[in-house]
Amino acid sequence: MTEPSTADLSAFELAAKISRREIKAVDAAHAYLNRVKSQDAKIHAFNEIYAEDLLAAAEMVDRSLDAGEKSGPLAGVPIALKDNLCTLKGHTTCSSKMLQNFQSPYDATVVTRLKAAGALVVGKTNLDEFAMGSSTENSAFGPTRNPWNPNCVPGGSSGGSAAAVAARMCAAALGSDTGGSIRQPAALCGIVGLKPTYGLVSRYGLVAFASSLDQIGPMTRDVRDAALFLNVIAGPDAKDSTSWPQTPPDYLRDIDRPPEKLRIGLPKEFFGEGLSPEVSKAIHKAVDFFRGHGAEIVEVSLPHTRYGIAAYYVIAPAEASSNLARYDGVHYGHRTAHAEDLIDLYAASRAEGFGPEVQRRIMLGTYALSSGYYDAYYLRAQKVRQLIKADFDHAFKACDVILSPTTPDVAFELGAKSGDPLAMYLCDVFTVTCNIAGIPGMSLPCGFSPSGLPIGMQLLGPLFSETVLLRLARFYETAHDWHRRKPGDDV
Ligand code: GLN
């Protein structure tokens, strides 16, 4: 067997080799920059690349390791950050004209923690504007393409991060997930994506979309890397009042210990109409695998799933309409050059700065919160939220983990859904309820379609069950090679 090239190593393997001095951090940085050079003109995963800083930081890592200094668990590992995570370096644009020139005066907590662990930032990745979308086509800077087939979307909104990891332009990346934006692009790009329990990872420095749903999480080559990155980013943070105050466990410790006898629930509502036969087939094969290894497979019901999209598309836009009020050309963001008076300045700045999907969400949210409609929409959606939470509580009495498809179908062609917001919203049908309930969810590769596009399986668990999800996913992954496949460079 030939040695895998540096950019093909997992983050875990790369970190080990760098710390053992088998690979120099500078060489790893060059390997990834070469990948960016050869791939990103086609894929457009990045909004900004920090080549010089990356190389300078890598040299520092080498120097400090050569001097025998103690290093962090990610020393020398090149990573990418979704461009809605605040970084002192460069711009934080949210792929919006509104924030095209915005420079954050601070690093997000996750960024601080990654840097302290020794990770090096390759650049900031493209997203649907303000993380609103499922294809990364809503970026003001042009779409990202799927490395498995550049005519297809990478999913969204963390499509840039997913494509960068899949195309080996970074060892791992961070994304954010409000209704599926880590798991859905992970599925469509054939990588692992984890949305942690709400509160497990600090949101300080994540540009807010819908604050009661947003979570930051890792997007990685394999499950062990997801555990490694979660170890670094999870844990209490005084700067985020919603962060969970307890110290999280070591997610790597038992990652290779197969889980004890588990009951895996299949929610019947996730296997009905609209699920593509090729996705269904791959998921059922995975179910057979678990059954063959002693898991008890039970059918569960999440009866309010069918209200998930409706509730999400009231709650998320409502919160967004409030969070995005600050971008008015005065407090923050693009300011129009042509305004007659103050009101006109606000209106024109917002009309020029926000793209069509963001404007649609602001209008939906403002409407849902307006007096006279609040009870009919927002309040009702909050009630549905409780029912969805109760569905999961009930289901987790009958099973330990829920297994489902991550998405109804594989990646679609660019433009296929961009004229039809509802069709785009339905991409999230299997992912939104997890955010609504606040529980953890992850997607991992479980096959390919006949046309060669990746398929993802979703695992959901009760609050703070990341350890179980990761161990179960790792058990599956070590018996399969889906995560080792990589897209061709010339597709
Ligand atoms: N696709 C969903 C939306 O457009 C979810 C986005 C996300 O998780 N950030 O809102």
Image: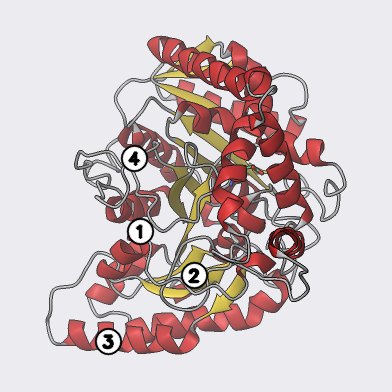
Q: Position of residue 313 (x, y in %)?
A: 67, 33
Residue at 69% x, 23% y is 373
First along the sequence among labels 1 and 3: 3
The residue labelled by disc 2 is 170
Please name the amino acid that badge 2 sits on: Cys
Say if mark 3 contacts mark 4, CB within 8 Å.
Answer: no
Q: Quadrant of residue 263?
A: top left
**Does the beta carbon of the residue at mark 1 sit less than 8 Å from ligand 1?**
no
Q: Judge whether residue 374 can be spotted in this image.
A: yes
The residue labelled by disc 1 is 110
- Mark 2 falls on what kind of element? loop
Q: Quadrant of ligand 1?
A: top right
- Mark 1 falls on what kind of element? helix
The residue labelled by disc 3 is 60
Residue at 73% x, 56% y is 138
Say if mark 1 contacts mark 3, CB within 8 Å.
Answer: no
Pair 2/1: label in front? 1
In the image, taking residue 8 as reference, residue 376 lies left or right, namely right
195 or 90, nearer to the observer: 90
Q: Quadrant of residue 180?
A: top right
The residue labelled by disc 4 is 242
Pair 4/1: label in front? 4
Q: CA distance from mark 4 to mark 2?
A: 30 Å
Q: Position of residue 103 (x, y in %)?
A: 49, 74
Q: Position of residue 208 (x, y in %)?
A: 50, 50
Q: Judge whether residue 406 can be spotted in this image.
A: no
